[in-house]
Image (cartoon, helix red, strand yellow):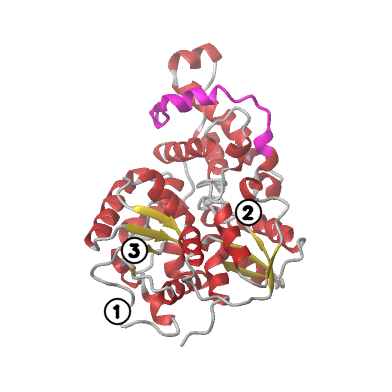
Amino acid sequence: MADNQEYNVKQLLEMGACTNCQACTDVCPAVSSSANGELSAVYRMKGLQTLLKQRTGLLGRLFGKKPLTQEELKHFSDTVFRCTLCGNCQEVCPVGIHLKDLWLSLRHDMVQSKSYPKKINMIRDNLAEDRNVFAEDNEERAEWVEDMRDPPDDNYIKDQSDVVYFTGCTAAYFPLAQKIPMALAEILDRSSVDFTLLGEEEWCCGFPMLGAGLGEMFQEFMTHNLEAVREKGAKELVFSCPSCYQMWREHYPQEFKLSHSTGFLLNLLKKGRIPIQKLPLTVTYHDPCDLGRGSRIFEEPREIIRSIPGVQFVELPKSKENCQCCGGGGNLEMVDAELSAEISKSKIQEVLNTGAQAVVTSCQQCVRTMTTYVRRNKVDLQVMDITQLVQKALRPGD
């Protein structure tokens, strides 16, 4: 059994600040898609408070609490991991509890307590053996380059470069998402940006570890990735994955300039370095949880969309900090694929109600989750990353 040292003093104080107002329940995508109140932040908070009281001898005696049985703990743990970590509960919390960090600590607690979904063991093994969460051969991390229309001889892997494009596990291995790095690489080429990939020297950024309660694995991965970037002599990292970007911003030492692709591309557009032409298309924009609520990047992608002539932009009813999750975060797809799909269904319905021809986002996991739902259900809707939108607007090259 884990102890209360999983939580820092600030978190222990925050737990006592919960007013049980249930504002978090109203915005939780897992609750609305499952009609199961046990997936709410309020239920999770109550369960956590009960758990901590039982572990503290005096409090336990005062409150007359019996320890949770292993079966009860397992039931509680199941609700802990059926969450996308979208952070909307934190966004609306009237007393400002840092709920997302609390849920990460709670997941680590559940793993230390040996009460967690079996899929977590698979995630741990995949990362330990293959350095990526999908158990793919890490030597093939940059093989997507070979599927480009005109791949360079060096496959974008150079000995030295000022800019490193950190691809991320999802975009590296999933065909649905590989179009995103292909698009970004083509745009960077057309804009005369000299950049390199890390290839097999790129390991998972660490986000799936924290989400799976496996934070003790992170140090090795961070140390390796830092050294791999240093060896390139790089000054800047570019990410198309919001989770990778957020991990580097919040958990790595601030040694390099960090840019999400939205900011990087907007800067190139403003300098007139991306040759674009008119693109007749009506689009709406989905704010990825880790880019929007997580990193507070809301305006850059909208500026990019508005800068493309011919594109008509319609805003979603729930947008920016209130944007509804696509269902693809928090390792939920691995733990409960059915719930993930139900959340995606709700998202797609909201998009369709705008009348847009395409939903644009800035996250490979959002693209993968929404595209999977659209294809399986034969929905007439284009799903694309913002890099793919810019790629569509490129003037024909030489």
Q: Nearer the viewer, residue 97 or 317?
A: 317
Say if mark 2 contacts mark 1, CB within 8 Å: no
User: Label 2 sits on what residue type?
Assistant: Leu
Q: Nearer the viewer, residue 104 or 121?
A: 104
Which residue is located at x 52 percent, y 50 percent?
Answer: 290
Residue 251 in view here: yes
Q: Please, is residue 287 above or below residue 385 in the view? A: above
Q: Local crowd at mark 2 within 10 Å, few (<14), some, or many (≥20)?
A: many
Mark 1: secondary structure: loop
Which stretch appears magenta?
Answer: 1-25
The reply, left or right, for residue 209 in relation to residue 328 is: left
Looking at the picture, which amino acid does disc 1 mark?
Answer: Asp
Q: Is residue 263 above or below residue 100?
A: below
How far apart are the two marked residues, 3 and 1, measured between alpha carbons? 14 Å
Kind of residue at disc 3: Val
Q: Which mark is residue 154?
A: 1
Please tell me which residue lies in front, 339 or 100: 100
The quadrant of the image that shows the N terminus is top left
Q: Which residue is mark 3?
A: 164
Residue found 70% across the figure and 73% down from its top: 378
Left or right: where does residue 41 sit relative to residue 34?
Answer: left
x%, y% of residue 101?
48, 38
